[in-house]
Image: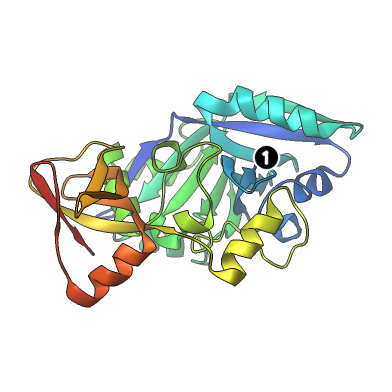
Amino acid sequence: MYENIKKIKLEDRIIIELIGTDTKGFLQALVTNNLDLVSCNKSIYAALLSPQGKYIFDFFIFESPLNGLLSIDCEINRYQELLEKLNIYKLRNKIDFNINKNITIFSIYGSDYSKLILDLEMNNIEGYTKKVNNSILIIDPRNKNLGLRIYSNTDNSLKKLDQIPYGTASELDYNRIQLTVPNPAVDLEIEKSFLIENNFELINAIDFNKGCYIGQENTARQKYRGTTKKKLVPVRVIGQNISNGTKIFHDEKIIGTMRSSCKDIGLVTIRTDIYKEYKKSKFNIKVLNSEIEFL
């Protein structure tokens, strides 16, 4: 029924539920995106920064149509760290946190996934959210071309999933890199990376009109004064794979760092002046036994 659509279970993610009064107000003062946008029909992607505006955590935020709780979809390897940070900021707020390990998270992707969206009677816009049976369906808030995220109490509560074959993590990665969407787990450095340098503005993770949040001042300064010195850009790798973290040299100077890659494409953190120079003269850069070509 559905050609060129695949699913993958996201076993590297977990759900934190917020229980208490004014949970939206609590997160609104902390994160980069606007909690006023969140409803049973709209979800967002956001980050939590240091006071200096440097990346610490990223996550999806949605209001569950199943139980009405504000929920965070975060990286499973770091959820304990995130809980510790949230508890520090909780202060006198009457809020508790529940780890919901009964939710299975799927990603649905592929060139024909829009057909599934039509069948499910969903609006194909970033963050659109809908309850179907015992599942929550969210068009990826970062970029709708990343596909659909499904949160389900059971593996088969959404029967249409049974018709979709399993894909691979590398296929999901290839699509993400093509769209120049960072995976912070591998593309950013904790308490070192800035969001503006890593396309977070382009993936709907920052609201510049919402008011104050932790790290807001430096983030706004980088946007409006254009003070960023680096940029995350897609490249084609010609030759052998280049490991994440490999330094990139030009004229015997470090000009960037290789980030995530898959097959013949990848993401590179590059100096903005070098990238502007490349746009004029279109030169390839040699990295070890390979070359990179900016896309």
Residue 30, horizontal then vertical, whole percent: 74, 46
Residue 140, horizontal then vertical, whole percent: 49, 54
Q: Residue furthest front?
A: 252
Residue 58, horizontal then vertical, whole percent: 56, 42
Q: In which quarter of the image is residue 219?
A: bottom right
In the displayed structure, would residue 224 be above or below residue 288?
below
In the displayed structure, would residue 107 be above or below residue 219?
above
Residue type indicated by callout 1: Ser
- Please name the residue that numbered disc 1 is placed on: 71
The answer to whether any part of residue 4 appears in the image is yes
At 48% from the left and 47% from the top, the residue drawn is: 149
Count of number-bearing discs: 1
User: 115 left or right of 88?
Assistant: left
Q: Is label 1 in a helix, a strand or a loop?
A: strand
In the displayed structure, would residue 173 be above or below residue 179?
above
At 92% from the left and 32% from the top, the residue drawn is: 92
Which residue is more in the foreground, 272 or 241? 272
Q: How crowded is mark 1: few (under 14 residues within 10 Å), some or many (20 or more)?
A: many
The N terminus - image quarter = bottom left
Which residue is more in the foreground, 176 or 235? 235
At 46% from the left and 54% from the top, the residue drawn is: 198
Q: Which residue lies furthest to the bottom in this view?
A: 280
Residue 34, horizontal then vertical, whole percent: 71, 58
The C terminus - image quarter = bottom left
